[in-house]
Image (spheres, rainbow, N blue to C red):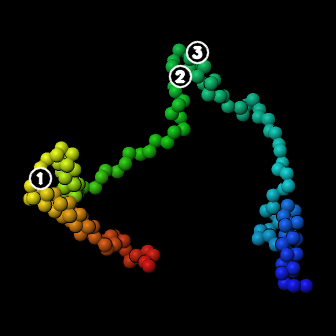
């Protein structure tokens, strides 16, 4: 018998047992037998007594209308209303000027191209320099160190 025919026989066995259900031995389970689920879930019907039965929302609406008052809308019930966001941090004047230069230079060039304005050399240079200067100013002010209040542990440093 050749190694190829042995391999073919193994594949035939695998294909033949493809749809067979696997039977697990309790020794191979990584959990105790007490945590196994039953084969069929238990189906119980529990009748609630009249005392435990709560009124339905439709019944509340009928009560409110009968008393002459307007029933409140249940549309907002159960919706999450997030708390108001914290205020934005205050920025200094240098950062504001850097952001204005970063977006103002290209905006001026785009506006002048859209309106077919003729730009002189110094105007073009100023717009490009403002963009580059704003970008560099923001990168330099970004900082690469940990925050001052981080303590002794830097976390995962790779």
Precedes in sequence: disc 2 or disc 1: 2
**Does 54 sit left or right of 130 as displayed?**
right
Q: Nearer the viewer, mark 3 or mark 1?
A: 1
Q: Quadrant of the N terminus?
A: bottom right
Residue 85, percent from left and from top: 37, 48
Crowd band around label 1 with a 10 angstrom C-alpha radius: few (<14), some (14–19), many (20+): few
Residue tagged by mark 1? 119
Q: Is residue 113 visible?
A: yes
Residue ID for mark 3 = 66
Residue drawn at 87 percent across, 62 percent down: 20
Label 2: state its secondary structure.
Answer: loop
| First of labels 3, 1 by sequence position | 3
* Residue behind mark 2: 71
- For label 1, the SS is loop
In this rendering, position of residue 74 left or right of residue 31? left
Residue 7: name its quadrant: bottom right
Question: What residue appears at the point 53 percent right and 22 percent down from the top-left corner?
Answer: 71
Taking 71 as reference, is 51 above or below it?
A: below
**Do the residues bearing badges 2 and 1 touch, measured as CB atoms within 8 Å?**
no
Q: Give the quarter of the image for residue 93.
A: bottom left
Q: Tell me the quadrant of the picture where the C terminus can be found.
A: bottom left
Q: Position of residue 5 (x, y in %)?
A: 87, 79
Residue 155's place in the image compared with 133, above or below, is: below
Question: Disc 2 or 3, which lies upstream in sequence?
Answer: 3
Marks 2/3: CA–CA distance: 10 Å
**Nearest to the observer: residue 135 or residue 152:** 135
């Amino acid at each position: 018998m050749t190694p190829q025919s042995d391999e073919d026989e193994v594949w035939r066995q695998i294909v033949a047992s493809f749809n067979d259900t696997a039977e697990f031995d309790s020794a191979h389970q990584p959990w105790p037998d007490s945590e196994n689920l039953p084969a069929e879930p238990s189906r119980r019907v529990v009748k609630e007594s009249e005392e435990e039965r709560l009124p339905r929302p439709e019944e509340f609406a009928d009560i409110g209308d009968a008393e002459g008052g307007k029933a409140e809308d249940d549309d907002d019930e159960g919706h999450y209303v997030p708390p108001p966001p914290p205020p934005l941090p205050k920025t200094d004047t240098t950062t504001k000027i850097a952001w204005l230069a970063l977006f103002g230079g290209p905006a001026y060039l785009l506006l002048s191209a859209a309106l077919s304005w003729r730009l002189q050399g110094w105007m073009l240079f100023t717009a490009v320099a403002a963009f580059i200067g704003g970008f560099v100013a923001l990168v330099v002010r970004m900082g690469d160190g940990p925050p001052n209040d981080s303590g002794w542990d830097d976390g995962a440093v790779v």
